[in-house]
Protein backbone atom coordinates (compact mmCIF):
# COMPACT_ATOMS: atom_id res chain seq x y z
CA UNK A 1 0.00 0.00 0.00
CA UNK A 2 1.31 3.43 -0.91
CA UNK A 3 1.13 6.15 1.75
CA UNK A 4 1.44 9.88 1.06
CA UNK A 5 3.25 11.75 3.80
CA UNK A 6 2.87 15.51 4.17
CA UNK A 7 5.89 17.58 5.10
CA UNK A 8 6.75 19.41 8.28
CA UNK A 9 8.70 22.61 7.76
CA UNK A 10 9.37 25.94 9.40
CA UNK A 11 8.41 27.53 6.10
CA UNK A 12 4.83 27.83 4.89
CA UNK A 13 4.41 26.06 1.58
CA UNK A 14 1.50 26.65 -0.76
CA UNK A 15 -0.54 23.73 -1.99
CA UNK A 16 0.92 24.16 -5.45
CA UNK A 17 4.53 23.57 -4.40
CA UNK A 18 4.22 21.46 -1.25
CA UNK A 19 6.62 18.52 -1.55
CA UNK A 20 5.10 15.07 -1.05
CA UNK A 21 6.85 11.84 -0.05
CA UNK A 22 5.12 8.68 -1.22
CA UNK A 23 6.17 5.55 0.76
CA UNK A 24 4.87 2.04 0.23
CA UNK A 25 4.43 1.35 3.97
CA UNK A 26 1.60 2.15 6.36
CA UNK A 27 1.81 4.13 9.57
CA UNK A 28 2.68 1.69 12.37
CA UNK A 29 3.65 -1.14 10.01
CA UNK A 30 5.59 -4.05 11.50
CA UNK A 31 8.87 -5.05 9.84
CA UNK A 32 9.80 -8.64 10.92
CA UNK A 33 12.52 -9.26 8.34
CA UNK A 34 14.82 -7.45 5.95
CA UNK A 35 12.56 -5.13 3.98
CA UNK A 36 13.07 -2.66 1.16
CA UNK A 37 10.83 0.41 1.27
CA UNK A 38 10.30 2.22 -2.01
CA UNK A 39 9.57 5.91 -2.06
CA UNK A 40 9.07 8.88 -4.35
CA UNK A 41 9.42 12.62 -3.79
CA UNK A 42 7.03 14.78 -5.79
CA UNK A 43 6.92 18.55 -6.29
CA UNK A 44 10.37 19.14 -4.86
CA UNK A 45 12.86 21.09 -6.95
CA UNK A 46 16.39 22.18 -6.08
CA UNK A 47 16.98 19.29 -3.67
CA UNK A 48 20.63 19.15 -2.64
CA UNK A 49 20.44 16.19 -0.26
CA UNK A 50 18.11 13.42 0.94
CA UNK A 51 18.75 11.52 4.16
CA UNK A 52 16.84 9.02 6.27
CA UNK A 53 17.24 8.09 9.90
CA UNK A 54 15.66 5.63 12.32
CA UNK A 55 15.17 6.96 15.85
CA UNK A 56 13.43 5.90 19.04
CA UNK A 57 13.21 7.40 22.52
CA UNK A 58 16.80 6.42 23.24
CA UNK A 59 18.24 8.15 20.15
CA UNK A 60 19.35 7.24 16.64
CA UNK A 61 19.38 3.66 15.35
CA UNK A 62 21.02 4.55 12.04
CA UNK A 63 21.57 7.49 9.68
CA UNK A 64 21.96 7.24 5.89
CA UNK A 65 22.60 9.80 3.15
CA UNK A 66 20.98 8.60 -0.09
CA UNK A 67 21.48 11.79 -2.12
CA UNK A 68 23.65 9.98 -4.67
CA UNK A 69 21.14 7.16 -5.04
CA UNK A 70 18.16 9.29 -6.04
CA UNK A 71 16.71 8.50 -9.48
CA UNK A 72 15.22 11.62 -11.07
CA UNK A 73 12.40 11.24 -13.60
CA UNK A 74 9.88 13.55 -15.22
CA UNK A 75 6.25 12.61 -15.74
CA UNK A 76 3.78 15.04 -17.32
CA UNK A 77 5.94 17.96 -16.28
CA UNK A 78 6.24 16.76 -12.68
CA UNK A 79 9.70 16.01 -11.29
CA UNK A 80 9.77 12.64 -9.49
CA UNK A 81 12.71 11.64 -7.29
CA UNK A 82 12.68 7.90 -6.57
CA UNK A 83 14.61 6.20 -3.76
CA UNK A 84 14.64 3.06 -1.65
CA UNK A 85 15.39 2.26 1.97
CA UNK A 86 16.47 -1.16 3.25
CA UNK A 87 15.86 -2.07 6.88
CA UNK A 88 17.41 -5.19 8.42
CA UNK A 89 16.10 -6.09 11.90
CA UNK A 90 19.31 -8.02 12.67
CA UNK A 91 21.46 -4.91 12.29
CA UNK A 92 18.94 -2.37 13.56
CA UNK A 93 17.58 -4.38 16.47
CA UNK A 94 14.03 -4.50 17.71
CA UNK A 95 12.47 -1.12 18.31
CA UNK A 96 9.39 1.02 18.21
CA UNK A 97 10.93 3.52 15.85
CA UNK A 98 10.33 6.57 13.74
CA UNK A 99 11.77 6.74 10.25
CA UNK A 100 12.56 10.36 9.39
CA UNK A 101 13.27 11.51 5.83
CA UNK A 102 14.95 14.91 5.50
CA UNK A 103 14.97 16.97 2.30
CA UNK A 104 17.51 19.79 2.10
CA UNK A 105 17.28 22.51 -0.53
CA UNK A 106 19.60 25.04 -2.11
CA UNK A 107 17.73 27.78 -0.29
CA UNK A 108 15.31 27.65 2.61
CA UNK A 109 14.92 25.38 5.60
CA UNK A 110 14.98 21.58 5.36
CA UNK A 111 11.70 19.68 5.25
CA UNK A 112 11.03 16.57 7.32
CA UNK A 113 8.78 13.54 6.77
CA UNK A 114 8.19 10.87 9.40
CA UNK A 115 6.47 7.50 9.77
CA UNK A 116 6.13 5.01 12.66
CA UNK A 117 7.46 1.45 12.24
CA UNK A 118 7.84 -1.54 14.55
CA UNK A 119 10.97 -3.61 13.89
CA UNK A 120 10.77 -7.18 15.18
CA UNK A 121 13.43 -9.87 15.28
CA UNK A 122 13.24 -13.62 15.75
CA UNK A 123 16.11 -13.23 18.17
CA UNK A 124 13.75 -11.55 20.65
CA UNK A 125 10.48 -13.49 20.44
CA UNK A 126 9.19 -12.14 23.77
CA UNK A 127 9.77 -8.49 22.89
CA UNK A 128 6.76 -6.27 23.53
CA UNK A 129 6.63 -3.09 21.49
CA UNK A 130 6.16 0.19 23.29
CA UNK A 131 4.18 2.86 21.41
CA UNK A 132 5.93 5.21 19.02
CA UNK A 133 5.81 8.96 19.50
CA UNK A 134 7.29 11.77 17.42
CA UNK A 135 6.49 15.47 17.73
CA UNK A 136 6.52 17.00 14.28
CA UNK A 137 6.68 20.63 15.42
CA UNK A 138 9.88 22.32 14.34
CA UNK A 139 12.33 22.67 17.26
CA UNK A 140 12.25 26.11 18.88
CA UNK A 141 8.98 27.03 17.20
CA UNK A 142 7.04 29.97 18.64
CA UNK A 143 3.89 29.82 20.73
CA UNK A 144 1.59 32.50 22.09
CA UNK A 145 -1.45 31.65 24.17
CA UNK A 146 -2.02 28.29 22.48
CA UNK A 147 0.62 25.86 21.24
CA UNK A 148 -0.66 23.67 18.42
CA UNK A 149 1.10 20.32 18.66
CA UNK A 150 1.08 17.78 15.88
CA UNK A 151 2.89 14.51 15.48
CA UNK A 152 2.55 10.76 15.02
CA UNK A 153 2.07 7.93 17.49
CA UNK A 154 1.18 4.29 16.91
CA UNK A 155 0.77 1.17 19.00
CA UNK A 156 1.56 -2.36 17.87
CA UNK A 157 -2.04 -3.30 18.59
CA UNK A 158 -3.34 -0.54 16.34
CA UNK A 159 -5.39 1.29 19.00
CA UNK A 160 -4.85 4.97 19.66
CA UNK A 161 -2.64 5.59 22.65
CA UNK A 162 -3.24 7.91 25.58
CA UNK A 163 -1.30 11.16 25.35
CA UNK A 164 0.12 13.15 28.25
CA UNK A 165 2.30 16.22 28.30
CA UNK A 166 4.56 18.22 30.54
CA UNK A 167 6.10 21.61 29.86
CA UNK A 168 9.02 22.92 31.87
CA UNK A 169 11.20 25.96 31.59
CA UNK A 170 14.51 25.18 29.93
CA UNK A 171 17.88 26.89 30.01
CA UNK A 172 18.84 25.98 26.46
CA UNK A 173 17.52 25.59 22.95
CA UNK A 174 18.08 21.81 22.88
CA UNK A 175 15.67 19.26 24.25
CA UNK A 176 17.03 16.89 26.89
CA UNK A 177 15.15 13.60 26.84
CA UNK A 178 16.86 12.62 30.07
CA UNK A 179 14.73 15.25 31.82
CA UNK A 180 11.55 13.24 31.17
CA UNK A 181 10.04 11.90 34.37
CA UNK A 182 8.10 8.73 34.88
CA UNK A 183 4.61 8.83 33.46
CA UNK A 184 3.26 8.59 37.01
CA UNK A 185 4.63 12.03 37.86
CA UNK A 186 2.06 14.64 38.83
CA UNK A 187 3.66 17.02 36.33
CA UNK A 188 2.15 15.08 33.43
CA UNK A 189 -1.28 16.17 32.27
CA UNK A 190 -3.47 13.94 30.14
CA UNK A 191 -4.50 15.36 26.79
CA UNK A 192 -8.18 14.64 26.33
CA UNK A 193 -8.91 16.74 23.26
CA UNK A 194 -6.96 15.03 20.47
CA UNK A 195 -7.73 14.72 16.78
CA UNK A 196 -6.46 11.40 15.38
CA UNK A 197 -6.07 10.40 11.73
CA UNK A 198 -4.25 7.17 10.78
CA UNK A 199 -1.66 7.51 13.52
CA UNK A 200 -1.26 11.27 13.16
CA UNK A 201 -2.51 13.47 15.97
CA UNK A 202 -3.15 17.15 16.53
CA UNK A 203 -3.95 18.93 19.78
CA UNK A 204 -3.76 22.34 21.41
CA UNK A 205 -1.94 23.02 24.66
CA UNK A 206 -2.47 26.27 26.56
CA UNK A 207 0.70 28.23 27.34
CA UNK A 208 -1.06 31.48 28.20
CA UNK A 209 -0.15 31.11 31.89
CA UNK A 210 3.58 30.84 31.18
CA UNK A 211 6.13 33.61 31.34
CA UNK A 212 8.01 34.38 28.16
CA UNK A 213 11.00 32.11 27.68
CA UNK A 214 12.30 28.79 26.38
CA UNK A 215 10.51 25.62 27.48
CA UNK A 216 10.80 21.89 26.94
CA UNK A 217 7.58 20.25 25.80
CA UNK A 218 7.44 16.50 26.41
CA UNK A 219 4.65 14.35 24.97
CA UNK A 220 4.12 10.87 26.46
CA UNK A 221 2.34 8.11 24.54
CA UNK A 222 0.83 5.38 26.73
CA UNK A 223 -0.32 2.03 25.27
CA UNK A 224 -3.22 1.05 27.54
CA UNK A 225 -3.11 -2.55 26.32
CA UNK A 226 0.48 -3.12 27.50
CA UNK A 227 1.07 -0.35 30.04
CA UNK A 228 4.21 0.67 28.15
CA UNK A 229 4.90 4.27 27.26
CA UNK A 230 7.39 6.30 25.27
CA UNK A 231 8.03 10.00 24.96
CA UNK A 232 9.43 12.69 22.71
CA UNK A 233 10.29 16.26 23.48
CA UNK A 234 10.89 19.47 21.60
CA UNK A 235 12.08 22.92 22.74
CA UNK A 236 9.54 25.69 22.22
CA UNK A 237 9.74 29.44 22.66
CA UNK A 238 6.81 31.00 24.50
CA UNK A 239 6.02 34.64 23.80
CA UNK A 240 2.80 35.91 25.37
CA UNK A 241 3.69 39.60 25.29
CA UNK A 242 2.64 42.03 22.60
CA UNK A 243 5.31 44.31 21.18
CA UNK A 244 5.05 47.96 22.13
CA UNK A 245 4.82 49.81 18.81
CA UNK A 246 6.26 53.32 18.95
CA UNK A 247 6.18 55.84 16.10
CA UNK A 248 8.53 58.81 16.00
CA UNK A 249 8.00 61.65 13.56
CA UNK A 250 6.57 65.09 12.93
CA UNK A 251 2.85 65.65 13.42
CA UNK A 252 2.81 68.73 11.21
CA UNK A 253 4.74 69.54 8.04
CA UNK A 254 4.33 72.16 5.35
CA UNK A 255 3.24 71.23 1.87
CA UNK A 256 6.19 70.80 -0.49
CA UNK A 257 7.78 68.35 -2.89
CA UNK A 258 9.79 66.81 -0.06
CA UNK A 259 9.54 63.20 1.13
CA UNK A 260 9.09 62.32 4.78
CA UNK A 261 8.92 59.07 6.70
CA UNK A 262 8.27 57.91 10.22
CA UNK A 263 10.51 55.83 12.46
CA UNK A 264 9.45 52.72 14.34
CA UNK A 265 12.90 51.79 15.64
CA UNK A 266 11.93 52.68 19.22
CA UNK A 267 9.47 49.76 19.21
CA UNK A 268 10.17 47.30 22.03
CA UNK A 269 9.33 43.68 22.87
CA UNK A 270 10.05 42.86 26.49
CA UNK A 271 11.68 39.43 26.71
CA UNK A 272 12.61 38.44 23.17
CA UNK A 273 13.58 41.84 21.80
CA UNK A 274 12.75 43.25 18.38
CA UNK A 275 14.79 40.85 16.25
CA UNK A 276 12.48 39.25 13.72
CA UNK A 277 9.67 41.76 14.17
CA UNK A 278 7.65 42.56 11.06
CA UNK A 279 6.70 46.21 10.70
CA UNK A 280 3.37 46.74 8.94
CA UNK A 281 2.90 50.37 7.93
CA UNK A 282 -0.30 51.93 6.62
CA UNK A 283 -0.69 55.55 5.58
CA UNK A 284 -4.24 56.90 5.26
CA UNK A 285 -5.71 60.21 4.18
CA UNK A 286 -8.82 61.61 5.86
CA UNK A 287 -11.16 63.36 3.42
CA UNK A 288 -14.65 64.45 4.44
CA UNK A 289 -14.64 61.97 7.29
CA UNK A 290 -13.66 59.08 5.01
CA UNK A 291 -10.37 57.28 5.69
CA UNK A 292 -8.64 56.16 2.51
CA UNK A 293 -5.58 53.90 2.63
CA UNK A 294 -2.95 55.24 0.25
CA UNK A 295 0.11 53.19 1.27
CA UNK A 296 0.42 49.75 2.91
CA UNK A 297 3.84 48.15 3.32
CA UNK A 298 5.30 45.42 5.51
CA UNK A 299 8.73 43.98 6.14
CA UNK A 300 11.68 44.17 8.46
CA UNK A 301 12.29 47.88 7.90
CA UNK A 302 11.50 49.98 10.96
CA UNK A 303 11.21 53.08 8.75
CA UNK A 304 7.86 53.81 7.15
CA UNK A 305 7.55 54.12 3.38
CA UNK A 306 8.32 57.59 2.06
CA UNK A 307 5.39 59.98 1.88
CA UNK A 308 5.25 62.83 -0.64
CA UNK A 309 4.09 66.03 1.06
CA UNK A 310 2.67 67.78 -1.98
CA UNK A 311 -1.01 67.35 -1.05
CA UNK A 312 -2.22 69.13 2.07
CA UNK A 313 -4.66 67.49 4.44
CA UNK A 314 -4.98 65.30 7.50
CA UNK A 315 -3.33 61.87 7.53
CA UNK A 316 -2.99 58.84 9.77
CA UNK A 317 0.12 56.68 9.98
CA UNK A 318 -0.36 53.31 11.70
CA UNK A 319 2.36 50.88 12.71
CA UNK A 320 1.52 47.26 13.54
CA UNK A 321 4.55 45.51 15.00
CA UNK A 322 4.18 41.71 14.70
CA UNK A 323 6.62 39.42 16.48
CA UNK A 324 7.56 35.87 15.53
CA UNK A 325 4.87 34.39 17.76
CA UNK A 326 2.17 36.39 15.99
CA UNK A 327 1.64 38.92 18.78
CA UNK A 328 1.16 42.45 17.63
CA UNK A 329 1.21 45.94 19.03
CA UNK A 330 -0.19 48.96 17.26
CA UNK A 331 0.15 52.72 17.36
CA UNK A 332 -1.49 55.37 15.22
CA UNK A 333 -0.18 58.89 14.78
CA UNK A 334 -2.09 61.69 13.10
CA UNK A 335 -0.22 64.29 11.13
CA UNK A 336 -1.12 67.24 8.99
CA UNK A 337 0.36 68.48 5.77
CA UNK A 338 -0.35 72.19 5.92
CA UNK A 339 -0.74 74.34 2.85
CA UNK A 340 1.13 77.66 2.95
CA UNK A 341 -0.78 80.58 1.48
CA UNK A 342 0.77 82.17 -1.56
CA UNK A 343 2.32 85.63 -1.23
CA UNK A 344 1.26 88.24 -3.78
CA UNK A 345 3.90 90.75 -4.89
CA UNK A 346 3.22 93.45 -7.44
CA UNK A 347 5.62 95.30 -9.73
CA UNK A 348 4.43 98.40 -11.61
CA UNK A 349 6.72 99.87 -14.24
CA UNK A 350 9.66 97.81 -12.91
CA UNK A 351 9.23 98.97 -9.29
CA UNK A 352 7.72 96.87 -6.54
CA UNK A 353 4.77 98.45 -4.76
CA UNK A 354 3.11 97.65 -1.45
CA UNK A 355 -0.47 97.04 -0.45
CA UNK A 356 -2.48 100.27 -0.14
CA UNK A 357 0.04 102.37 -2.02
CA UNK A 358 -1.04 105.22 -4.35
CA UNK A 359 0.34 105.25 -7.87
CA UNK A 360 0.06 108.24 -10.21
CA UNK A 361 -0.64 107.66 -13.88
CA UNK A 362 -1.65 109.78 -16.81
CA UNK A 363 -4.95 108.72 -18.30
CA UNK A 364 -3.47 108.69 -21.78
CA UNK A 365 -0.53 106.45 -20.84
CA UNK A 366 -0.07 102.75 -20.10
CA UNK A 367 1.61 101.01 -17.21
CA UNK A 368 3.30 97.62 -16.99
CA UNK A 369 1.98 95.31 -14.27
CA UNK A 370 3.96 92.26 -13.21
CA UNK A 371 3.20 89.50 -10.64
CA UNK A 372 6.32 87.40 -11.27
CA UNK A 373 7.74 88.01 -7.78
CA UNK A 374 4.71 86.34 -6.19
CA UNK A 375 5.62 83.00 -4.67
CA UNK A 376 4.37 79.85 -2.99
CA UNK A 377 5.82 76.51 -1.95
CA UNK A 378 7.67 74.66 -4.68
CA UNK A 379 4.87 72.19 -5.34
CA UNK A 380 2.30 74.97 -5.89
CA UNK A 381 4.45 77.56 -7.65
CA UNK A 382 3.86 76.34 -11.20
CA UNK A 383 0.09 76.12 -10.70
CA UNK A 384 -0.54 79.58 -9.29
CA UNK A 385 -3.34 81.66 -10.83
CA UNK A 386 -2.92 85.41 -11.16
CA UNK A 387 -6.23 87.27 -11.29
CA UNK A 388 -6.26 91.02 -11.92
CA UNK A 389 -9.19 93.15 -10.86
CA UNK A 390 -10.08 96.73 -11.65
CA UNK A 391 -12.49 98.24 -9.15
CA UNK A 392 -13.14 94.75 -7.77
CA UNK A 393 -14.13 93.32 -11.16
CA UNK A 394 -12.00 90.41 -12.48
CA UNK A 395 -10.55 91.56 -15.80
CA UNK A 396 -7.52 89.45 -16.68
CA UNK A 397 -5.50 86.35 -15.79
CA UNK A 398 -1.77 86.09 -16.26
CA UNK A 399 1.56 87.12 -14.82
CA UNK A 400 2.38 90.34 -16.73
CA UNK A 401 0.88 92.79 -19.17
CA UNK A 402 0.48 96.47 -19.99
CA UNK A 403 -2.81 98.13 -19.09
CA UNK A 404 -4.48 101.38 -20.02
CA UNK A 405 -6.77 103.63 -18.06
CA UNK A 406 -10.17 101.93 -17.84
CA UNK A 407 -13.09 103.36 -19.80
CA UNK A 408 -14.36 105.57 -17.00
CA UNK A 409 -14.77 109.25 -16.14
CA UNK A 410 -13.32 108.66 -12.70
CA UNK A 411 -9.95 110.12 -11.81
CA UNK A 412 -8.88 106.93 -10.00
CA UNK A 413 -9.33 103.18 -10.01
CA UNK A 414 -8.44 100.31 -7.72
CA UNK A 415 -5.99 97.77 -9.15
CA UNK A 416 -5.92 94.43 -7.36
CA UNK A 417 -3.75 91.35 -7.84
CA UNK A 418 -5.13 88.11 -6.41
CA UNK A 419 -2.80 85.08 -6.37
CA UNK A 420 -4.57 81.72 -5.95
CA UNK A 421 -2.96 78.32 -5.35
CA UNK A 422 -4.41 74.90 -6.19
CA UNK A 423 -5.94 74.67 -2.70
CA UNK A 424 -7.92 77.88 -3.46
CA UNK A 425 -5.91 79.77 -0.86
CA UNK A 426 -5.33 83.39 -1.88
CA UNK A 427 -3.15 86.41 -1.30
CA UNK A 428 -4.27 89.89 -2.34
CA UNK A 429 -2.48 93.17 -2.90
CA UNK A 430 -4.29 96.35 -3.99
CA UNK A 431 -3.07 99.78 -5.04
CA UNK A 432 -4.96 102.95 -5.92
CA UNK A 433 -4.16 104.35 -9.35
CA UNK A 434 -4.91 108.09 -9.57
CA UNK A 435 -4.83 110.57 -12.44
CA UNK A 436 -1.59 112.49 -12.12
CA UNK A 437 -3.23 115.58 -13.63
CA UNK A 438 -6.07 115.63 -11.06
CA UNK A 439 -4.42 114.98 -7.73
CA UNK A 440 -6.64 116.53 -5.10
CA UNK A 441 -6.90 115.82 -1.42
CA UNK A 442 -5.44 112.46 -0.48
CA UNK A 443 -8.03 111.77 2.23
CA UNK A 444 -10.92 110.88 -0.06
CA UNK A 445 -8.88 108.52 -2.30
CA UNK A 446 -7.50 106.77 0.76
CA UNK A 447 -11.00 106.28 2.17
CA UNK A 448 -12.12 104.96 -1.19
CA UNK A 449 -9.09 102.67 -1.38
CA UNK A 450 -9.57 101.01 1.98
CA UNK A 451 -13.31 100.77 1.53
CA UNK A 452 -12.68 99.02 -1.75
CA UNK A 453 -10.14 96.66 -0.18
CA UNK A 454 -12.57 95.70 2.58
CA UNK A 455 -15.29 95.06 0.01
CA UNK A 456 -12.88 93.09 -2.14
CA UNK A 457 -11.85 90.82 0.72
CA UNK A 458 -15.50 90.17 1.52
CA UNK A 459 -16.43 89.54 -2.09
CA UNK A 460 -13.41 87.34 -2.72
CA UNK A 461 -14.14 85.19 0.30
CA UNK A 462 -17.83 84.91 -0.61
CA UNK A 463 -17.50 84.28 -4.31
CA UNK A 464 -14.04 82.75 -4.66
CA UNK A 465 -15.43 79.35 -5.53
CA UNK A 466 -17.45 80.88 -8.37
CA UNK A 467 -14.46 82.45 -10.09
CA UNK A 468 -13.59 79.87 -12.71
CA UNK A 469 -10.69 80.26 -15.05
CA UNK A 470 -13.06 80.40 -18.00
CA UNK A 471 -14.72 83.57 -16.63
CA UNK A 472 -11.61 85.69 -16.83
CA UNK A 473 -9.63 86.51 -19.97
CA UNK A 474 -6.02 85.31 -20.04
CA UNK A 475 -2.96 86.76 -21.64
CA UNK A 476 0.40 85.27 -22.41
Image (tube, rainbow, N blue to C red):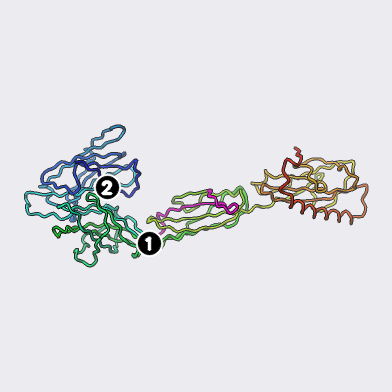
90, 2: nearer the viewer: 2
**80 vs 409: above or below:** above
Q: Residues within 10 Å of mark 1 (few under 14, many from 20)?
A: many
Q: Nearer the viewer, residue 171 or 385?
A: 385
Residue 112: assigned label: 2
Checking the image for residue 240, the label placed there is 1
What is the x, y in percent for residue 263? 51, 55
Q: Position of residue 347 (x, y in %)?
A: 79, 46
Q: Which quarter of the rendering shows the C terminus?
A: top right
Which stretch appears magenta? 271-294
Residue 104 within the magenta-colored segment of the rendering: no
Q: Could you tell whether 124 is left or right of 447 in the image?
A: left
CA neighbours of label 2 inside 10 A, class few (<14), some (14 to 19), many (20+): many
- State the residue at coordinates (25%, 64%): 189
**Dot placed on the residue nearer the N-terminal end, 2 or 1:** 2
Q: Real-space Cα distance between discs 2 and 1?
A: 28 Å
Residue 362 horizontal/vertical position (percent): 90, 44
| 288 horizontally vs 304: left or right | right
Magenta: main secondary structure equals strand
Q: Residue at 47% across / 57% down in the picture?
A: 265
Question: As drawn, which residue projects farthest toward the bottom?
Answer: 186
88 horizontally vs 290: left or right: left
At mark 2, the secondary structure is strand
For label 1, the SS is loop
Q: Nearer the viewer, residue 248 or 136?
A: 136
Amino acid sequence: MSILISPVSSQQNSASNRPIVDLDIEEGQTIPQETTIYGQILYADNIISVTWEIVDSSGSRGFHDISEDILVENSNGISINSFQITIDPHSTGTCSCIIIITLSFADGDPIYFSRSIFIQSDSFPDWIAEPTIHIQNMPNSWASGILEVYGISSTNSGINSQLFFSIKQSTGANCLNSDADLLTSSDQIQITDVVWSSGSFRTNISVSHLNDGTYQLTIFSNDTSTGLFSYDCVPVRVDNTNPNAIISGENKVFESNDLINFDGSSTTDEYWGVEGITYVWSISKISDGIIENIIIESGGNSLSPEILTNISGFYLVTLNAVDRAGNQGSETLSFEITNLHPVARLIIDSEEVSNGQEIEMEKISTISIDASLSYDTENDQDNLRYVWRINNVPIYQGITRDIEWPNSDSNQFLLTLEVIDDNSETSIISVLIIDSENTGSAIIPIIVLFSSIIFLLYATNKYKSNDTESDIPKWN
